[in-house]
Amino acid sequence: MTTFEVIALIVSGVFVGFINTLAGGGTIISLSLFMFMGLPADIANGTNRIAVILQNVTSVATFRQQKLLDTRKALWLALPTVIGSIIGAQLSVQIDEATFRKAIAVVMLMMIFFIVTKPDKWLKGQVKLQEMKVSPLQMLIFFAIGIYGGFVQVGVGYFLLAGIVLGAGYDLVRANAIKVFIVLLYTIFALVIFILNDKVNWQYGLVHSIGNIIGAFVASRYAISWGTGFIRWFIIVIIFITSADLLGIIDIRGMVNF
């Protein structure tokens, strides 16, 4: 590995860790860089999970320190997500994802409508929903999200935030704390699947993780001071960029290949 590659992996990791902690979609940068550096798409997909785990260990620890994580509710929501992620990871080593990615991009763009037209639900939270037990419907929704997350990871944060905010009643700051906890748990299981199928490059993954940890720490440390309003608009911008890439309107991989 050259000095340039090490620097590229770490610097890009800072941006990825920051974006993934506050919103989602940063994985596109990771996958693009890995493939530019010569990794096949399936190995890039597996290698990315190393950085995802380590960035979320950092985020979870920081959110817990600030008493923003509802661990009990997070565990209940994580259970079906973990099960789904195992299935998704198995599928990812044998199914073409091109059409699936385009469909997801359309759904993500639809989410912007709800974020813009119903800001109160995203900014203030709903205490009554937070106090309710996790319903079978919520379990099913998070199971489906887990399948997608295990399959490709890109943009899974948006769907988790939607489920946690609109379904469980948390504001964006606390929802992000639960989101990173769920992603941490299910990615551990997904990574095992990729390891068993020899789809992980540990050298690239661990070096990239250095930057991810830094970005995740900054995002989780200052999320509460920036407030839900900032996070809401940050998410909207990142959704537009991620969706444009998934639909082929822009080419983030090409941008990385400077």
Image: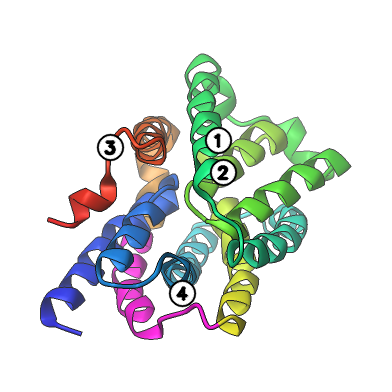
- Tell us which disc is closer to us: 4 or 3: 3
Determine the secondary structure under disc 3: loop
Tag 1: amino acid? Ala
Q: Which residue lies under the disc numbered 1?
A: 103
Q: Which residue lies under the disc numbered 2?
A: 100
Q: What stretch is highlighted in magenta?
A: 198-217
Looking at the image, is mark 4 or mark 2 earlier in the sequence? 4
The N terminus, quarter of image: bottom left
Determine the secondary structure under disc 2: helix
Q: Which residue lies under the disc numbered 4?
A: 50
Looking at the image, is mark 4 or mark 3 earlier in the sequence? 4
Tag 3: amino acid? Ile
Real-space Cα separation, disc 4 to disc 1, in angstroms: 26 Å
**Looking at the image, do the residues carrying marks 4 and 2 touch, with CB atoms under 8 Å apart?**
no
Q: Which residue is drawn at 56% across and 31% down?
A: 107
Real-space Cα separation, disc 1 to disc 2, in angstroms: 5 Å
Depth order, front residue of 19/121: 19
Tag 4: amino acid? Ile
Tell me: residue 221, above or below residue 164. Answer: below
Give the image location of residue 123, x and y in percent. 51, 29
Give the image location of residue 239, x and y in percent. 41, 35
Q: Which residue is drawn at 60% across and 36% down?
A: 162
Taking the view exactly as shown, the residue that stands out farthest to the right is 136
Real-space Cα separation, disc 4 to disc 3, in angstroms: 27 Å
Residue 68 visible in the shown view: no
Q: Magenta stretch containing residue 211, yes or no?
A: yes
Q: Which residue lies under the disc numbered 3?
A: 250
